[in-house]
Image (cartoon, helix red, strand yellow):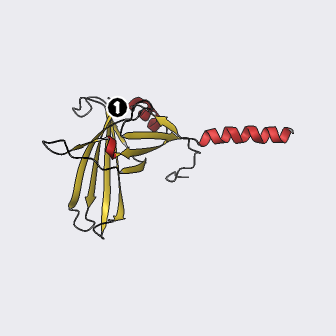
Amino acid sequence: MRWFLFLFHCSISFSGFCQPEMIGSFTDLMGALKSGHEVRVVIHYAQCRQEAGDADTTPVPDVSASLKIDTWEFFSRNAIGNPMAFVVFSEYKLISHPKKEQYLYNYGKIKVFENNTATVDARYIHPRTFRTMMKQQYQCTIRDGSTAGGIEFSKYETDGYEDNAEG
């Protein structure tokens, strides 16, 4: 009976350790990044506003994307003449475009501001010429659990064995 209680207690403790925790603000995002937590982001484009030049009326399709934040750069307020503090990160992957039947780089850059908004820059780039084949920009709000923002962040506890750890 003691072993059962011990194993039951350990399984509850371990399962809580692996659960993601929602990050609902810029301040919490920076705290998680600076403390070395693994952070993932999910973008719900339909809940963001697409920048479409002078007429911001372009309907946004129901498309989602995600990425793990590996490399990021933080700029405090007025560090480079910026009126708000922000963190920026990007990623690109070689994909097979579903319609064009060709390989393209899928590039995404996200800039998150201290007022809990974010700018998402999505591009398709030709892998040989580096010509931009598609460019779209979105304005999103951080989802905090009570508001349906278009960008959500989750932090995960790390076990100390990171993919890029030297050792």
Question: How many residues crowd mark 1 within 10 Å: few (<14), some (14–19), many (20+)?
Answer: some
Q: Is residue 120 above or below residue 32?
A: below
Observer able to see residue 39? yes
Q: Secondary structure at mark 1?
A: loop
Considering only vertical position in the picture, is 61 above or below 86?
below
The extreme right residue here reads: 1
Which of the 4 image quadrants contains residue 40?
top left
Instruction: Reply above or below: 2 against 94.
Output: above
The N terminus - image quarter: top right
Give coordinates of residue 113: x percent, y percent: 31, 34
Q: Position of residue 47 (x, y in %)?
A: 33, 41
Image coords of residue 164 (percent x, y): 49, 53
Residue located 47% across and 40% down the image: 154
Q: Is residue 9 above or below residue 91?
A: above
Q: Between 48 and 115, which is closer to the camera in this rendering?
A: 48
Q: Nearer the viewer, residue 84 or 75?
A: 84
Is residue 136 rendered to the left or right of residue 3? Answer: left
Res. 37 in view: no
20 left or right of 79 in image: right
Give the residue pinned by disc 1. 116
Q: Nearer the viewer, residue 45 or 33?
A: 45
Hey, what amino acid is under mark 1? Answer: Asn
Quarter of the view holding residue 25: top left
Residue at the image point whose x is 27% and y is 29% from the top = 84
